[in-house]
Image: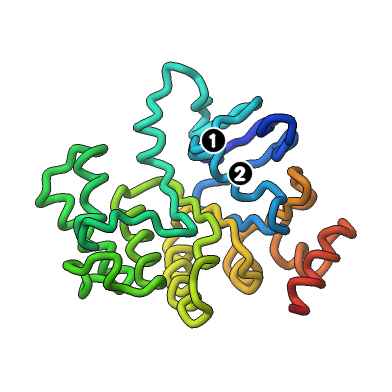
Amino acid sequence: MSDKIIEIRHLSKSFGDHEVLKDIDFNVSKGEVVCIIGSSGSGKSTLLRCINMLETPTSGEVYYNGQDILQKHISMTNYLSKVGMVFQQFNLFNNMTVLENCIVSQSAVLKRKKSQATEIAMKYLDLVGMSKFINAKPAQISGGQKQRVAIARALSMEPDVLLFDEPTSALDPEMVGEVLAVMRNLAKSGLTMLVVTHEMAFARDVSDRVVFMDGGVILEDSRPDVIFNNPTHTRTKEFLKRILEA
């Protein structure tokens, strides 16, 4: 059996006449940490949203463990329980406590008993350093703490893959480090991670592969040392020069 957990074949996505993704071929293997970098508007987030079906691809195929999830007989609920997502804006339920946020999907989707869901939620809230805040509402905690809760919520579903869509972009600079520290620890644990990010140090130091996107296509897909020290494309060189100088 292939160790590829996510496979993308000839994926395209258009919004009206605007083609955002163009014939994307791409895969993620079990245990890999893959970072996607590129300028705003390059298609990074749209690619992630097509993988977790927040956007329906215009054409192409998305495989999870060898099965094309776009086929009608595939259970989308089961698929989405295995492929978690951490968003830019946290997407927590403001009327629920931290603990309740981490329990609700377990109960609704996985049908876990409250006692089991609570135990699992506490395990992951402790992992991200948020177990002291279980009774707080999202409005009572900082942005960095909200994002750590969002990560714990995603982990509580015990997914096979965790997608991160620019998880630090909505944070104040002093809060970025605490979220990246959690993500670094998750990477060390062997969790399969696909991360859209502007954090170049994280991409360079933590990822197994770095993907550079531009204009809706993948220009480069290689090891971090190759991408950062010896990129092939002029566009990649220009992007990295601008970002790293900034």
Mark 1 vs 2: CB contact within 8 A: yes
Q: Residue at x 40, y 38 (%)?
A: 80
Judging from the image, the colouring scheme is rainbow
On the image, the x and y values in percent for residue 229 come to 80, 70
In the figure, 216 relative to 133: above or below? above
On the image, the x and y values in percent for residue 90 come to 41, 59
On the image, the x and y values in percent for residue 197 come to 60, 62
Q: Which mark is residue 55?
A: 1
Mark 1 is on which residue type? Answer: Glu
Q: Residue at x 21, y 51 (%)?
A: 103
Is 112 displayed left or right of 203 in the figure? left
In the figure, 174 relative to 87: above or below? below
Q: Residue at x 46, y 74 (%)?
A: 181
Mark 2 is on which residue type? Answer: Thr
Residue lying at the far right of the rendered structure = 234
Quadrant hosting residue 83: top left
Near-viewer residue (185 or 3): 185
Near-viewer residue (177 or 136): 136
In the figure, 32 relative to 8: above or below? below
Q: Residue at x 35, y 32 (%)?
A: 78
Mark 1 closeness class: few <14, some 14–19, many ≥20 residues within 10 Å:
few
Identify the secondary structure beneath mark 1. Answer: loop
Q: Is residue 111 visible?
A: yes
Q: Is residue 13 visible?
A: no
Identify the secondary structure beneath mark 2. Answer: helix
On the image, the x and y values in percent for residue 128 come to 33, 69
- Residue corresponding to mark 2: 46
Cα distance between the residues tagged 1 and 2: 7 Å
Quadrant hosting residue 238: bottom right
Is 100 displayed left or right of 232 in the figure? left
